Image: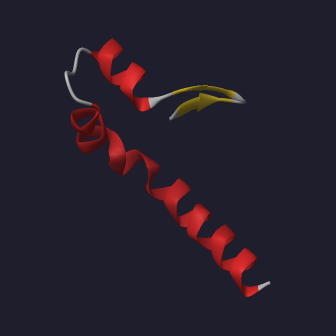
Amino acid sequence: MVCRGYDCTDVRTVSGRLGYADASTTLDIYAHFVHHADERAASNIGTVLDG
């Protein structure tokens, strides 16, 4: 997903707009940009599971 505030667009649509046939191409190229978000998600999930 690509989001700006609460307005989100799924990766398949973004991929098509960028001219890629597969969403996996978009993810392969741009996934490194979401590393910080992944760390934040892991922390949040850990907090919820630790209760």
Q: Is residue 1 above or below residue 41?
A: above
Total labels: the figure holds 0
Residue 29 position (above or below residue 4)? below
Residue 30 sits in quarter? top left
Q: Could you tell whether 13 is left or right of 47 in the image?
A: left
Q: Quadrant of residue 27?
A: top left
Q: Residue furthest bottom?
A: 50
Pick the residue in front: 20 or 5: 20
Quadrant holding the C terminus: bottom right
Quadrant location of residue 49? bottom right
**Residue 16 on image: x %, y %:** 31, 16
- In the image, 41 versus 36, the foreground residue is 41
Task: Identify the residue at horizontal 40%, vertical 22% (top origin).
Answer: 14
Q: Where is residue 33 drawn, in percent x and y? A: 40, 46
Q: Is residue 36 above or below residue 11?
A: below
Q: Residue, x 34% and y 50% (percent of image)?
A: 32
Please tell me which residue lies in front, 29 or 46. Answer: 46
At x 65%, y 78%, the residue is 46
